[in-house]
Image (cartoon, rainbow, N blue to C red):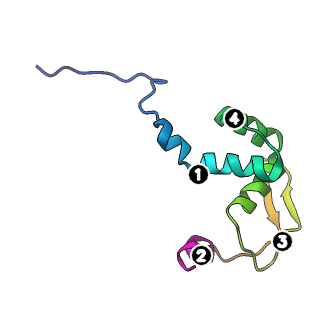
Amino acid sequence: MMHETWVKEGDLLWAPSERIKKASRMMAYMAWLEENNGLELNDYHALWEWSVSHVPESWESVWQFFGIQASRPYTEILRRRMPGAQWFMKSQLNYAEQVFCKHCE
């Protein structure tokens, strides 16, 4: 007879090791925020709190962290909140260039 184990909503199914956490892009981003913006965010919850209380600033930092290259720069980071938000007004970029640019260097 096969033993069945049921997973309930809210059960933690996996957690990354400390080594994986330290090597993650999220941790690199948090270190970048501290170095470039003076933000000391010690964990995911602190990052989340900052991102939802400073929406335009957090999205601008993502743009900068990932080195987005635009043929036309944005004039405004966020116009209106959800629903109907408009991001990085007037910017123009090539999506394929963003996806493949790191592989072309």
Q: Upstream in the sequence, badge 3 or badge 2?
A: 3
Q: Position of residue 49 (x, y in %)?
A: 75, 35
Is 11 positioned to the left or the right of 46 in the image?
Answer: left
At x 76%, y 80%, the residue is 71
The residue labelled by disc 2 is: 101
Instruction: Find the distance from the CA under tag 4 to the CA under tag 1.
Output: 15 Å
Instruction: Find the distance from the CA under tag 1 to the CA under tag 2.
Output: 17 Å
Q: Upstream in the sequence, badge 4 or badge 1?
A: 1
Q: Quadrant of residue 73?
A: bottom right
Name the element at disc 1: helix
Magenta residues (range): 96-105
Q: Residues within 10 Å of mark 3 (few under 14, many from 20)?
A: few
Instruction: Find the distance from the CA under tag 3 to the CA under tag 2.
Output: 22 Å
The residue labelled by disc 3 is: 90
* Residue situated in front as seen by the camera: 61 or 13: 61
Q: Residues within 10 Å of mark 4 (few under 14, many from 20)?
A: few
